[in-house]
Amino acid sequence: MPASPARAIGLLGGTFNPVHIAHLRAAEDVRERLALDQIEFVLSAVPPHKGDADLAPIGDRRAMLALALEDHPQFTLNTLEIDRSGRSYSIDTIRARQATDPEAALTFILGADAFAEIESWKDFADIFAACNVCVMSRPGSTIDEPPIAVAEAFCYDSSRGVFAHRSGRELTFVPVTALMISASDIRARRATGRSIRYLVPSAVETYMATHDLYGTATADPKGTATAAPNSGAGPRGRTPTR
């Protein structure tokens, strides 16, 4: 009997602070374009490039993400990063996920803004050799090729529209639906009492209201309520090991 094909799994990481419709729509675009069997939303506790002043408690972010994913059979919550101590580095997460299922065909998914900074990430060149990489690009994005530091490891396959890495992995740029929604705007709306309807799933909106998240009193990631401004947060990236 022939062996079953490896399951194609996408890994999409972030603080999801909070998760919103643009996260979900972009993931669906990638799932469909790459014919992925499953996308795992990898929840980050405290990523290296961010402080924790703006982060809702990890338990609340986990609950909201679970609510947002519950209606999609091919979207699941991955807790690898919050289950281990310390800051979250993408290469460590990829290796840990491979260890749990060596036969899975993994695709690491990230946004164009984060990809623009990938050369500052821990062991970034190893990411391209460890798994496939998908960059979500929106209209107007000018990033459409590998980083200069690793460009010699790739060649462009015009028949498939991908950059082939010498390891056999692939780098793909996938256009996603342009939705002008951001977590920082949602937090700002909550802080000033404005509506967030249709920006987040209804279950997530209800959860935020019930738990008074992102209001004038912002709870820190350890669960202690503190008065804090709701400043914006950039894309999920990775900085070098300190």
Image (cartoon, rainbow, N blue to C red):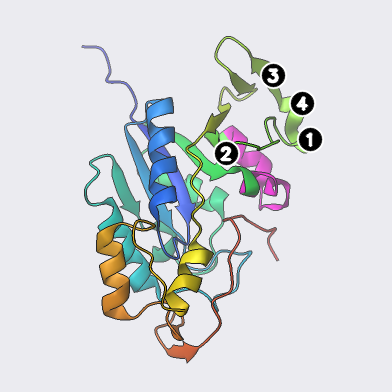
Picture quadrant of residue 98: top left
Residue 237 in the image: state x and y as whole percent. 61, 55
**Circle number at residue 155:** 3
Q: Amino acid at mark 4?
A: Glu
Q: Secondary structure at mark 1?
A: helix
Q: Amino acid at mark 2?
A: Arg
- Kindly give the residue lying farthest to the top in the view shown: 159
Q: CA distance from mark 3 to mark 2?
A: 23 Å
Q: Residue at x 67, y 40 (%)?
A: 125
Q: Secondary structure at mark 4?
A: helix
Magenta-drawn segment: 114-129
Q: CA distance from mark 4 to mark 3?
A: 8 Å
Crowd rating for badge 1 (residues with CA inside 10 Å; few <14, some 14–19, many 20+): few
**Circle number at residue 148:** 1
Q: Are marks 4 and 2 in contact (CB under 8 Å)?
A: no
**Circle number at residue 152:** 4
Instruction: Give 191 or 147, whichever is nearer the viewer.
Output: 191
**Circle number at residue 138:** 2
Residue 157 in the image: state x and y as whole percent. 62, 14
